[in-house]
Structures are given as structure tokens and as C-alpha cells.
Amino acid sequence: MARRGPEYHAGMGTQLTVPLEDIDLSSIEFWLAGSDYREAAFATLRQAAPVYFFEEGEFPWFPKGPGYWALTRYDDIVEASRRPDLFCSGQGTNITDLPPQIGEFFGSMINMDDPKHARLRGIVQKGFTPRMVAQVEQYVRDKAKALVDEAIERHTDGTCDFVEAFAAPLPLQIICEMMGIPREDETRVFAWTNVILGAGDPDYGGSFESLMSSSLEIYEYAQALGDDRRRNPRDDITSALMQAELDGERLTASEFGSFFILLVVAGNETTRNAISHGMKALTDFPDQRRLWWGHFAAGARNAVEEIVRWATPVISFRRTATADTQIRGVPIKAGDKVVFWYNSGNRDEHNFEAPQSFDVRRYPNNHLGFGAGGPHFCLGASLARREIAVMFQEISRRLPRLEVTGPPAMPQSNFIHGIKAMPCAWK
């Protein structure tokens, strides 16, 4: 069982040393420990056992699985990601095998292999053409400006929750706008995504029943929305997806329902958490904040990439070996689970200079924040980059002294590197 580490304290690096025998990535205690402890543990794995087997944890909702191989080095994660023939996604991307009644809701292309994956991605890419994304460019800017206006007007004392005021509403309202979701439904969509990604966290329901209920509700909502746009197309991505064809085929209602869950969850939560971690890093590294604020436009591209590397909103994804193979001489059998730990790859000393430092001028920065290449690279990467850049541009222009004033509240998760709430002030 992992020891309880110090409280979350991003930006200070780690001086801890964690023995290999003390590390258990499957224990709840490990993920409740402070970030310094976890960073030290992953550093030990990268150096002493970059391919290491862990037993799976036991959860009341799911049967205990057979265990998994943890990949913690950057090069190994990239190499395996680019071999979908050898490390497939079709048997699940969560460490724990999902029950069939849950799996059907999350059976979108993230859990598919070619040729099915290629067919579905080929269809949905038609909804993410440069023209479709360009349509929301001004909306992103207008929304970021409106959020700052609202924060200044509502919080006259100059203090608020950064996640609630800035990080959460921007990506949520943009993805809802793109999908044609009515404004009055945004609160429901936000609540559903919190429950789905926060499964196990008491603040987000924390029960199998709440996970099932939210999954069913958002799935049914998506199918109804898709059916409406098939009959009554509008100028939104839902309509584009429901009308798009690839080799004479269109999305089925169930395919759209699963993809909708993937899109609104990924498009909302991951960008929200990148913005939140970015603000925390800019507070913890004031010299980097001054560098970027002083030359915002020129430094935006590198700074955004560093925020995504630093945040690594998705901690891990699982693959399954399709044949006997080996990684770094370690035998992997067909059917074995292999887990890519992106957070560790993004701190790999062999690939990043001073990886425990936040550097807005870092270049090159071939991080794993949007995946590690291959067919499952993040479809919404360009949109996420734009949202992050625009939000911080508006903050730097209107609230240049805004900073985090207390420790963030973190969800209990080995999948999403999230921030639930985080106090900030600008006076």
C-alpha cells in the first residue's frame, strides 16, 4: 500500500525517493497522496522498472481484473501507441473492464480498432473541418470576454472559484454551441460529464447507480438530438455528423449516442482541467507568467503546449496485446493489459530537459497531452489549443494580477488529472 505523501504542491519539483516495492498504482491511497509523492514514484518506475506489472485493485462495482503492465517511459508509450495492430483499443481503454451495460454507452471510436475505427473517424472528421472549427473562433473570443466581464461584475471583492468562473464554462459552452445543444441544457450536460469522469469521487455521486443513470440519460439525450438533426438539419456539428456519409454509410443512432458522450466529455473536462492547471502553474512560477504576459502573442503557442504537457489532463489509457511480444526485453503475452501512463511520459527525464519545471518557452515540446500519435490522436486538439490560448489572453489583458490563492480540490482518479475547485483573486 502506498504511503500518504505531502499535500498537492505543483511547481516545486520533488526531492522524495520512493522505493519500488512501496509503489502500487492500483491503490486508492496512491492517488490520494500528494503530487510530490506520486511524481517521485513514477520517477522510480522510469529508472528502475519502466515496464512493471501491477495487480488490479478491487472495486465494489467491477470484478477484479488480471492485472496490467505499466509503461512509464516516453519512448515506450509512443512506440506502442503507433502499433495498434499489436496493442489494440477494441478490448477496452479503461484499466478496469467495464460491465457490458456500461460498455455499450462508451463504445465509441476511442474503444475501436480498424477498420471500424477508421470508418467512424472518417465520418466524424467531416464535422471537424477547418470551416466548422473556424465558425466558433469568434464565439470563443466573445465567450472568454463575457466570462471575465461576469467575474468582475459578480465578484466585487476580486475573489472567486477559478474553475467555476473561468475554466469550466468556456469549453462547456463552446462544445454545446458547436453541437447545437440549447443553452438551457448546458447545466445538465455539465453534471452528466462530472459524474461520468468522476465515478468513484463522492462529490460527483460516487456510486455505480449514479454512473449508470448519468450514462443512460446522456445517451438518450444524444440519440434524441441526433434524430432531430437528421430530420431537421441546422448549421451545427450534430447536423454535419448526422448528414455525413462515408462509402454510402451514415452514423447510426447508437453510434452517434456513444460518440456524443465521448465528444462532450472529452471536449469539456479535459480542456477545463488544462486551463485550471495552467493557472495554478502560472501562479507557482511567477517568472514564467511575466515572460508570457510580456510577449503574449509571440509566446502563446509554446506556452499552450507547455500547459498541456504540465497538466496532462488524461493520466492513462489502456491497450491490450494482440500477440506475444516484448517491451525492453520484458515478455508481454497476448491478452495482457498494457497501460500508458501519459503523466509519467510527460515528465520523462530522458526526453524533456528539467521536466519538473514549468517553462513557457519550452521548444520542442512533443508532449503526450493529446495522446502519443497513432490513429487515436485527439480529434479536438486544435480546438483545445485555441480555447486555452484565448482564455489566458483575456485574463492577461483584463486581469493580469489574477492568481491562485489556495490549494485546489482534486478528484479521486487515476484517469483524469482534474481540479474540481480552486480559489483565486485579482485584487
Image (spheres, rainbow, N blue to C red):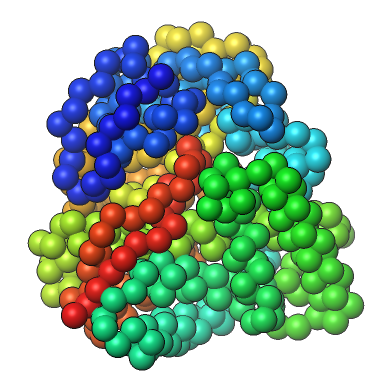
Quadrant of the frame with the C terminus: bottom left
> Which residue is rendered at x = 41% and y = 82% of the image?
147
> Which residue is rendered at x = 56% and y = 21% of the image?
56
Quadrant of the frame with the N terminus: top left
Rendered image quadrant of residue 163: bottom left
User: Would residue 48 appear left or right of 338 to someone viewing this image?
Assistant: left
- Residue 369: in sight, yes or no? no
Q: Nearer the viewer, residue 222 or 135?
A: 222
Q: Name the spot of residue 381 as percent of width and height, x first.
A: 48, 59
Of all residues, the one furthest to the left in this rendering is 287
**Above or below 139: residue 164:** above
> Which residue is rendered at x = 77% and y = 64% of the image?
222
> Which residue is rendered at x = 57% and y = 42% of the image?
200
Q: Name the spot of residue 34 as percent of width and height, x first.
A: 30, 38
Q: Name the spot of residue 80 as percent of width and height, x first.
A: 50, 29
**Above or below 101: residue 303:** below
Q: Nearer the viewer, residue 348 or 363?
A: 348
Q: Name the spot of residue 344 as percent of width and height, x first.
A: 35, 34
Q: Nearer the viewer, residue 238 or 270?
A: 270
- Residue 189: in sight, yes or no? yes
Of all residues, the one furthest to the right in this rendering is 231
User: Would residue 206 appear left or right of 411 to someone viewing this image?
Assistant: right
**Above or below 184: residue 301:** above
